């Protein structure tokens, strides 16, 4: 399955701009700049409802992976946002970066143009033939940068519960999203949120907008703290060559941050789920050490989301931290797709690349559908029993220390699954749930029971456990060269999320 899908919707009929037909070319350019591994173009029909129906059909599948929707006018957001509501429900927040609130109805709109009604339609009030199947609540919406509200829109904002931050500072925006209680965020960007003195290729410009670096800063701050599950970019009417040049830098950077957010959040959960007993924090770095254990994850430094300009000094400290413990400096470059500049720097400094690893994700219901249990699986959440099982089945050097210092201290809710046959333990998997996600660690099958369905039985039980603990999104890691395990996970419903590897010095 593709890592990222770009859905191009060259719809222009919903715009009030006199030059709206330029939106078709703008959508194609935005799609080119987004660089997705899969690109789907939704043909714009003669009527908005026809285009919306085609887009909704595309998002039956596309919402299950990271998707960037490019328009076209803002009306193209109907399908992706509705699909996000379907997937995440009340756990979703929508951050609407737009110069306009898009909160009119057919009765209140001065222009009658649908791109000024799309958010209100997503909230359940709009043209009947465009109302989406899954709708937002006002408390899920944050208007960011809206500075040209019609009177009826302002009245709606005042009474509905929508959060409106006309030109937010970073802390106000982050706090607004946190206040929703959401675990997942969809970001909408109408390019007229930018200041027209900097970017003018839009149909309805408004003064006093964001500068490009300000927009990147706000989006990256959201991506660092929340899981961005979708991104929409709209309303580009190509007019000035300098605006195209600006977009060639802006669009890939926005996409990079949003695409990195889910892998980043997974790695933060994994660090909590597999805790090293000795941890030092250094300007966002997480330096980890487990005495008596050679495993890389708990004896490595995990970098921050943003690498600082003082990285040289930080690397010196990291080397010293591990030298004092008679270890080589080990850095987990993760997610690798986000930390490419750090990886290049470490390679230049002589750090060797090691243990390339894939992170895979799946929905619990998909895993249940794809697997059939063939052996009995039991679960225990007693830390002492979990540690004992791990020691018995792991068989790697330092397993006793891992069991005592890590497995026995897995943060709850956690459980050890054991596959049993003839009263004998023949397989295990450690589960740790955290804010909607369940990590699966230490999947092991005894050597004389491999290829007998033990792995599938453990995954089936893991998915059931995850649903019972309100954490139905699954993740696990598998080394790149472990083809047998990769085949098991793929046929069980897992797909690629991201990759990571280590850099070792000296």
Image (spheres, rainbow, N blue to C red):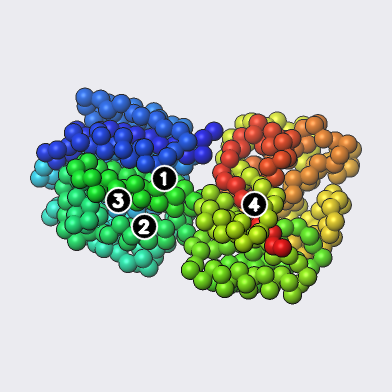
Q: Is residue 303 left or right of residue 192?
A: right
Disc 4 is placed on an element classified as: strand
Give residue 459's quadrant in the image: top right
Q: Is residue 159 visible?
A: no
- The mark nearer the N terminus, 2 or 4, is 2
- The mark nearer the N terminus, 1 or 2, is 2
**Residue 230 disc label:** 1
Q: Is residue 487 left or right of residue 266?
A: right
Residue under numbered circle 2: 216
Q: Nearer the viewer, mark 1 or mark 2?
A: 2
Residue found at x 74% / y 62%: 406
**Residue 246 disc label:** 3
Q: Nearer the viewer, mark 1 or mark 3?
A: 3
- The mark nearer the N terminus, 2 or 3, is 2
Q: What distance separates the C-alpha of mark 1 from that of mark 3?
A: 22 Å
**Residue 501 disc label:** 4
Q: What distance separates the C-alpha of mark 1 from that of mark 2?
A: 16 Å
Q: Dot 1: few (<14), some (14–19), or many (≥20) neighbours within 10 Å?
A: many
In percent of width and height, residue 76 lies at 29, 37
Give residue 492's quadrant in the image: top right
Disc 2 is placed on an element classified as: helix
| Pick the front one: 83 or 284 | 284
Confirm or deny contact between disc 1 and disc 2 (CB under 8 A). Answer: no
Q: What distance separates the C-alpha of mark 3 from that of mark 4?
A: 33 Å
Q: What distance separates the C-alpha of mark 2 from that of mark 3?
A: 12 Å
Residue found at x 73% / y 55%: 381
């Amino acid at each position: 399955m593709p890592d990222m899908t770009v859905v191009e919707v060259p719809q222009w009929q919903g715009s009030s701009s006199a030059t709206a037909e330029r939106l078709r070319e703008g959508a194609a350019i935005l799609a080119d700049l987004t660089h997705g591994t899969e690109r789907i173009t939704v043909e714009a029909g003669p009527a908005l409802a026809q285009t919306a129906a085609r887009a909704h059909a595309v998002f039956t599948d596309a919402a299950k992976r990271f998707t960037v929707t490019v328009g076209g006018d803002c009306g193209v957001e109907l399908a992706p946002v509705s699909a996000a509501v379907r997937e995440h429900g009340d756990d979703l927040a929508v951050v609407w970066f737009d110069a306009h609130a898009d909160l009119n109805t057919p009765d209140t709109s001065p222009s009658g143009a649908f791109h000024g009604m799309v958010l209100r339609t997503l909230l359940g009030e709009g043209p009947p033939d465009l109302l989406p199947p899954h709708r937002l609540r006002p408390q899920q919406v944050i208007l960011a940068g809206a500075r040209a509200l019609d009177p009826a829109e302002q009245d709606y904002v005042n009474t509905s519960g929508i959060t409106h931050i006309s030109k937010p500072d970073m802390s106000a925006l982050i706090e607004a999203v946190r206040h929703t209680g959401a675990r997942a965020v969809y970001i909408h960007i109408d390019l007229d949120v930018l200041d027209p003195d900097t970017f003018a290729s839009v149909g309805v410009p408004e003064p006093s907008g964001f500068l490009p670096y300000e927009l990147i800063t706000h989006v990256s701050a959201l991506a660092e703290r929340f899981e961005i599950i979708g991104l929409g970019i709209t309303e580009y009417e190509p007019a000035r060559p300098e605006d195209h040049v600006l977009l060639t830098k802006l669009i890939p950077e926005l996409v990079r941050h949003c695409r990195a957010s889910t892998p980043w959040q997974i790695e933060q959960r994994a660090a909590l789920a597999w805790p090293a007993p000795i941890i030092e924090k250094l300007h966002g770095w997480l330096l980890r050490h487990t005495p008596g254990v050679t495993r890389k994850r708990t004896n490595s430094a995990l970098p921050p989301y943003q690498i600082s300009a003082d990285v040289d000094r930080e690397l010196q400290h990291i080397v010293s931290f591990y030298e004092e413990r008679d270890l080589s400096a080990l850095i987990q470059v993760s997610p690798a797709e986000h930390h490419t500049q750090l990886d290049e720097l470490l390679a230049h400094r002589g750090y060797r690349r090691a243990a390339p690893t894939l992170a895979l994700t799946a929905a619990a219901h998909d895993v249940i559908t794809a697997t059939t249990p063939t052996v009995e699986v039991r679960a225990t959440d007693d830390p002492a029993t979990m540690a004992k099982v791990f020691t018995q089945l792991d068989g790697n050097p330092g397993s006793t220390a891992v069991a005592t210092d890590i497995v026995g201290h897995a943060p709850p809710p956690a459980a050890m699954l054991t596959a049993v046959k003839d009263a004998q333990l023949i397989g295990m998997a450690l589960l740790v749930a955290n804010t909607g996600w369940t990590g699966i660690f230490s999947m092991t099958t005894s050597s004389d029971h491999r290829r007998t369905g033990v792995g599938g039985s453990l995954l089936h039980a893991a998915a059931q456990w995850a649903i019972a603990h309100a954490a139905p999104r699954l993740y696990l890691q598998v080394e790149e060269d472990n083809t047998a395990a990769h085949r098991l996970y793929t046929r069980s419903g897992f797909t690629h999320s991201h990759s990571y590897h280590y850099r070792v010095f000296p």
